[in-house]
């Protein structure tokens, strides 16, 4: 029997990804349906979130389901010392599906091993963010008309950025070229570059955020340097403002170039980029609703 949890983007085959994109497209055309009537979804957020939590909640409500959970762990019995295992077992008693974000890498996998209902990983530490990747893939297909043979430039925190790790893994099905732009401290981890080599995927790594690279790019994927992942605040201070995209840097961009960002942004995309035809990060966040509707249906076999 198929495992209905989604812990890592590698849980999905290429065919499933393409089918989820089609399902998300149908939800974009008609987001209000009664597919989840009588179902309850548990939403457990051990880390802050705006988009992921609210788009999941919206997805459940627009499909006629109900949602329980917490967005502040201090209001749960974890504050009294209850373990993650016991928390997951309790919520399994009440909900048909659990959506969980946790600050520890591997927490979602562990939850899926103790839960009696499917788990959807809404981000685990610096590891994976597979539902973000599904909305990213949907957005890339929407803006480019294809997922095949694209040049994708990833900028910023490539070390701790779970969204770039998940996206890289998913794109391997579609013959991309990658450009990785980061400072030395935040380089793409070796395991992902090794995977690119094994898949025969071309990649280049540089510290220079140059217009030459932007001009050959189809998808410019900006990321935030995540203060919450640094144990030493001085290390964060050194690298936090290294890369800022401005509108003038996009002047030679290809017509199909689109700037994506999982958001929230801090300083890495200047406000003047919002007014260019290349900015697509707000529509990308909106697509999270449709992609998550499709993923909830997958998890519940609906
Ligand atoms: N992209 C993303 O995960 O945003 P939130 O942290 O607001 O959920």
Image: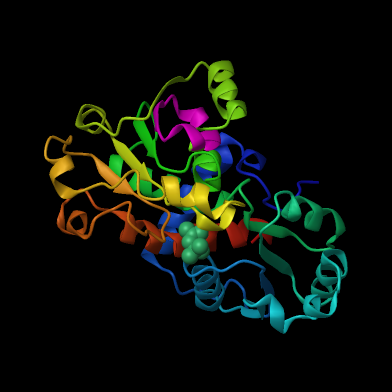
Residue 53: x percent and y percent?
A: 55, 70
Instruction: Give the percent coordinates (x, y) of residue 75.
Output: 71, 84
Name the residue furthest bottom.
75
Left or right: residue 47 versus residue 206 is right
**Magenta residues, start to end:** 168-185
Residue 212 at x, y percent in the picture = 21, 27
Way the structure is coloured:
rainbow
245 on left or right of 168: left
Residue 234 in view of the camera? yes
Which image quarter is the C terminus in? bottom right
- Rendered image quadrant of residue 155: top left
Vertical placement of 57 versus 295: above or below?
below
Residue at far front of view: 234
| Residue 93, image x, y percentages | 84, 75
Residue at x 69% of width, y 73% of height: 42
Q: Residue at x 46, y 65 (%)?
A: 289
**In the image, residue 195 lies in the stretch drawn in magenta:** no
């Amino acid at each position: 029997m198929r495992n209905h949890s989604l812990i890592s983007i590698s849980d999905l085959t290429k065919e499933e990804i393409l089918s989820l994109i089609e399902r998300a497209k149908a939800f974009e055309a008609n987001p209000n349906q009664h597919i989840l009537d009588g179902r309850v979804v548990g939403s457990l957020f051990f880390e802050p979130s705006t988009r992921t939590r609210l788009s999941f909640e919206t997805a459940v409500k627009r499909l006629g389901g109900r949602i329980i959970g917490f967005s502040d762990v201090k209001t749960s019995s974890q504050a009294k010392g209850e373990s993650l295992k016991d928390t997951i077992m309790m919520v399994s008693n009440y909900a048909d599906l659990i959506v969980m974000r946790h600050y520890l890498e591997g927490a979602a996998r562990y939850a899926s091993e103790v839960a009696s209902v499917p788990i959807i990983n809404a981000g685990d530490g610096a590891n994976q963010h597979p539902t973000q990747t599904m909305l990213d893939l949907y957005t890339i297909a929407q803006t480019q008309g294809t997922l095949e043979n694209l040049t994708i430039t990833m900028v910023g925190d490539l070390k701790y950025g779970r969204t770039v790790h998940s996206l890289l893994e998913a794109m391997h099905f579609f013959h991309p070229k990658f450009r990785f732009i980061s400072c030395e401290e935040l380089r793409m981890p070796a395991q992902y570059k090794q995977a690119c080599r094994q898949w025969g995927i071309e990649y280049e790594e540089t510290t220079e955020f140059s217009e030459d690279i932007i001009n050959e790019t189809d998808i410019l994927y900006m990321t935030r340097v995540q203060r919450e992942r640094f144990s030493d605040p001085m290390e964060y201070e050194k690298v936090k403002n290294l890369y800022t995209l401005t509108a003038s840097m996009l002047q030679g961009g290809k017509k199909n170039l689109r700037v994506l960002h999982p958001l929230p942004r801090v300083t890495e995309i200047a406000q003047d980029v919002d007014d260019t035809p290349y900015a697509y990060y707000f529509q990308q966040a909106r697509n999270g609703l449709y992609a998550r509707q499709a993923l909830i249906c997958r998890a519940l076999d609906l």
